[in-house]
Each structure stands twice: as structure tokens, then as C-alpha cells.
Image (spheres, helix red, strand yellow):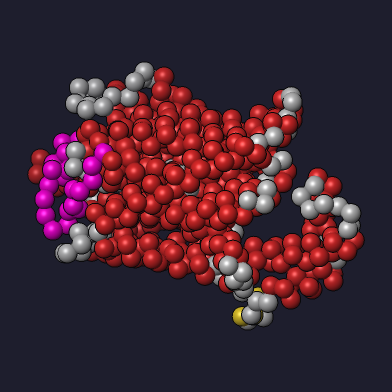
Amino acid sequence: MSMLFAKKSMDLLMKEAEGEGENTLERALGPFQLTALGVGAVIGAGIFVMAGLGAHYAGPGLMLSFVLSGLGCGFAGLCYAEFAAMIPLAGSAYTYAYATLGELIAWIIGWDLTLEYAMGASTVSSGWSNNFVELLNVFNLKFPLWLAYDHWTGLRKAMEEVGRDVMSRSFPSLAPGSQDYIKQMSELIAAPTADMVTRAHQVLGAPTLFGHEIGINLPALIIALLITTVLAIGIKESAKFNSTIVVVKVAVVLFVIGLGAKYVHPGNWGTNWHEFAPFGMSGIGAAAAYIFFAYIGFDAVSTTAQEAKNPQRDLPIGMIASLFVCTLLYIGVAAVLTGMVPWQSVNIEAPLARAFLDRELVWASDVIVVGALAGLTSVMLVMLLGQTRVLYAMASDGLLPKKFFAEVHPRFRTPFKNTFLVGTLAGVVGAVTPIDDIGKMVNIGTLLAFVIVCTSILVLRRTDPGRHRPFRTPWVPFVPVMGILANGYLMVKLGWLNWARLIVWLAIGLVVYFTYSVKHSRVRQRLTNSVGVKG
């Protein structure tokens, strides 16, 4: 039983951080590149995709949902910063748990991070595709529904198209976008006639395989494969690519806030608490749990610790600075979005672009779509980068096959095999799964990681208080305890179905651990040899 919680000593971790060899990564990232990686991952899905979903839970209270999510991330971020500065290795929360809570917990968090990063990239690839389809519409280019969306989303889109036609004939006096129109449309879609269903399948136009219609989000698959190729070429090239995109998308976000503020109608925010938060704090909490996906960028920065030039100083700067800047931008965008459009009318797939289209600002919508594409591209890059580095760390410890997951390309100095595997899987999942289902799965994995990191700070402060800490989490135990409570609360708000998915995923991981990892763990082998020598 004690071997299950065998810890990787801090001295061994520091020796690995200073090591050199053919399987080490290149240290090429400074504070600007690290902050840009954080902003690159944070600004994207939350603003350009998940904000639409969050508005339908919180109404104008979406602004408070971003504050609530930001607080949970802030507490966790301060804990991450201490670990990242103290243990400058790839692996993020996995490595921190190995040093404090033992191998089994480290495996669980590493497996959990796979759910966070790989599925996060899948979510973003799906969101990227939605905006790509919007951009094609600008040029009057129509992408077949069955190639633009997964089957379920494509069928829903086809049903909406049929529904609009029925509405135009049955309720010609109702203005599209009005409250009555939305209500009638919702009732129509919820209980369609047999004729509507038949027409929807005709509009979808999907081919069949073994008697079942198929649908594949082709743009999502292609962009995931392109980003994977960039990552495999090298970390310097990836960082430069990301930094360029970050400049573009931050400029677009500021443009959205500046122009959108002119079209805000304060009445859309409501005149009392019930109108501002139509579902109360419960709705605000639920929205915070779903949009939490938007914040996972700053912890992805910690996975690049082994590629930072001065990790003890630069990693805390990169994580905390990116989190602070992005939270302010999120709140501003949420205020503009819910001020421009009644929350019931906020579009889920492309909320900002649709908001400006409704104001007949077609050119502004086009700018937003381009910004969304740039933003989501960088998010995908950082998510896939984080995933490959976690798998690299786990394989280096022997918990996964080292020859595959930890092999570094002799020229590009990247774990190229696991990069291509992760990118391909992320693209395939994003191509065949509805975006909201993937996003919810990602969030619960992220929140669990944050809870474990906050717990690890409390453990290490007690077990190794004298260890040199280039950055110290302030106000311990208050900050880590609040991080545990805030992120644990958001986990609860995700509901039982997402807990079930998490439990099933972790059960699969435990099967892998007990059938492979326990036999190949380098830490276990070192401890066993040490005991044998002493004996």
C-alpha cells in the first residue's frame, strides 16, 4: 500500500530540472512568451464560444459568473505559481502531486489533465469550425451541414432552418429575434411535426453508413492537425506563432468592448436583481462552472516549465499576469454582450459575431469572426502543448511507454510522437462530438486539478517547510483553502452527469495504472532497489 503513495523527492526533481541529454526539452521561453501563452489559452473559447452558453444560465449576471470563476482560478493560480517556481519541470499539477501526495494521486491528476487539455483542444476545434463557417457565409460560401458539424449539431441546425421557414409562414407578424418569436420557435423545435423532421433530414443531406446518417466537423479536424504540425516543428516556432496571434485577438477584444459599448441598452441588464440574474445565484454559479473552461490557460503555462529560460521568476509572472488581464477583458465583454442583446437571444455558437450582425454591423461581425479564428487557434495550440508535456512527464517517470510518449525529435527537440497522437485524437473528438458536451467534461477535470494543487500546497508547507521557494503563495492556509472551496463548489454545480463521466474516465485510468504503470514506475524501482541494498 505504501508504494501506491511513493513520492518523488524534491532533490530528484531539482536534479531532473537541471539535467541535460537527448530527451530533454529546449529552454527558449521568456516572461513575454509565457504570458502570451497564458493569454493565448485564456482569451478565446470563453469569449468567442462559451460566453453564449453561460448567458443562457446566468442572464446579465454572466458578469458575476466570470468574477466567480476568476476568483477560483486566482486562488489556484497563486498555488500553481509557488509550485511552478519551485519545481521547474514539465507536467504541471501531475509533477506537483508526485512530490507531495504520492504516485497514485499523481497518476490520477495526470490522467485527469489528459481530460482537461485534450478535450479542451477538441472543444476549441469545434468552436473554431463554427466561426470558420460564419466566415465562409460572409463570402456566400455554404459548407454542407454534414461536413460542418457533428451529426447531432448538424441535425439541430437543419431543424432550425426548417423552423425559420415554418415561422415565416405561420407567424409572419413576429419579428425574428423578438421574445415572442423566440418562444414560438423554441416550442416548435421542441415538438416538431413529422413533416418538419423529414425536411430537416433532407436539409442535412448526410450520407449513411450501415443505415445511419453520419456527420463530421471537417474544419475542426483539419485545424487540429495543422496546429499539431506547428507544435511538432519546435517550441520557438510555436511561441512566435502564438505571440503573433495573441496580439491580433487582444486587439479584436478591445475593439469589441469599444464599439459594442455604443450599442449597449442598460435595460437589457435589468432594473432589479431578478432581471439581472433570472435564475439567481444558482444560475450564476452554474454559468461560472460551465464557462470555467475559459480560464484553463494559465495552468497550461506551468506545463512549459522545462522550456522556460528562468522558470523560478518567469512562470509566476506568466500565470498571474495572464489571469489578471484576461479576467478584466472577460468582464468587459460579458457586460457588452448582455447589454447589446437580451440574454434569451444570445447565440450559443458565435455570440459576439451574431450580436453585431443583429445591429447590421456586418463589417464589425467580420472582424470579430477573424479575431475569433485567431483566438481559438492559439487556445488550441496551448491546450495541445500542455497535453503533450504532461504525457512527456508521465512517460519520463515510466508511467507510460517512454519510447513513444517521451521520445524527443533529434532536430526539433519536441516530443513529436505523442504530439501527433494527441492532436489527431483531439481533432477526431472535436469532429464528431457536440461542443457543449465536450466543454462540460473538460471543466470538471480542470477543477479537480485545481483542488489537488491547492491541497498539495497545504501538504508541502507542512512536510517540507524549509524548502527554498522563489515564489511563496501568500496567506497560507487561507488562499489554498479558499481555492479548494471555490473550485469544489464549481465542481458540484456541474451536476451528476459530469461527475459520472469523470468517475468513468478515472476508472479507465486506474485500469491502465495497475496493468502497466505500477510495473514500470521509475520511482518504485528506485525505492525497491534502495530497500534491497539496505537489506
Rendered-image quadrant of the N terminus = top left
- In this rendering, the answer to whether 415 lies above or below 32 is below
- Does residue 6 belong to the magenta stretch? yes
Residue 182 rendering spot, x and y as whole percentages: 79, 50
The image quarter containing residue 407 is bottom left
Viewer-side residue, 40 vs 454: 40
369 to the left or right of 343: left
- In this rendering, the answer to whether 98 lies above or below 244 is above
- Does residue 228 belong to the magenta stretch? no
The residue range painted magenta reads 3-31
> Could you tell me if residue 401 is visible in this image?
no
- In this rendering, the answer to whether 50 lies above or below 221 is above
Residue 391 rendering spot, x and y as whole percentages: 32, 54
Viewer-side residue, 340 vs 179: 340
The image quarter containing residue 133 is bottom right
What residue is shown at x 78% (from left), y 73% (from top)? 199
